[in-house]
Amino acid sequence: MRLLLSALLCGSVLWGPAHALTYEGEEAAALRCANMIAYTAVTLARADMIGEDEKTIMLGVTVLILERHVSGTRAQKKAAMGKMRDRRSIDQTLEDYRKHAAQCLVQFPIN
């Protein structure tokens, strides 16, 4: 799982138009949820507000949402997550987490 986490969350890779994928509807919502959880996990861990175990669990939830609710290759999902991350500030993402995290887990179950 750590390899997948690294593949999804490490530095960006440039992809040509042939690799682009547009997500809509439920898949776009799942991407928003996954991005929100991942970005929050990393932000809180960097601020020493959660430990590595909690961060790992949250990133694992992100991976499961992506695997089960979003089509495309790992590279396509990673690129979409990067674009989404770049559109939202840390403050916006944390506010989204406060408001929507519980609903994300209902809408996009991981078990």
Image (spheres, rainbow, N blue to C red):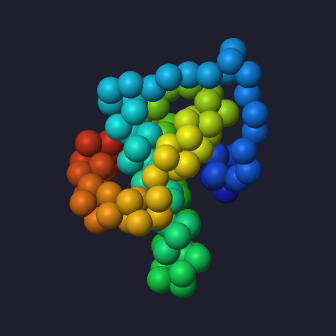
Residue 58 in sight here: no
Residue 49 in sight here: yes
Position of residue 61 measured from the top left corner of the image (x, y, whole percent): 45, 54
Number of numbered discs overlaid on the protein picture: 0
Position of residue 58 measured from the top left corner of the image (x, y, whole percent): 47, 62
Position of residue 62 measured from the top left corner of the image (x, y, whole percent): 48, 51
Q: Quadrant of residue 99?
A: bottom left
User: Among all residues in the image, which is located at the extreme bottom?
Assistant: 48
Q: Residue at x 64, y 52 (%)?
A: 9
The reply, left or right, for residue 61 in relation to residue 72 is left
Q: Quadrant of residue 77?
A: top right
Q: Residue at x 30, y 51 (%)?
A: 105
Q: Residue at x 38, y 60 (%)?
A: 92
The reply, left or right, for residue 13 in relation to residue 4 is right
Above or below, comparing residue 106 to residue 79 in the picture: below
Q: Nearer the viewer, residue 74 or 32?
A: 32
Q: Nearer the viewer, residue 53 or 28?
A: 28
Position of residue 72 measured from the top left corner of the image (x, y, whole percent): 56, 25
User: Among all residues in the image, which is located at the extreme top?
Assistant: 18
Q: Residue at x 41, y 59 (%)?
A: 93
Q: Nearer the viewer, residue 47 or 86?
A: 86
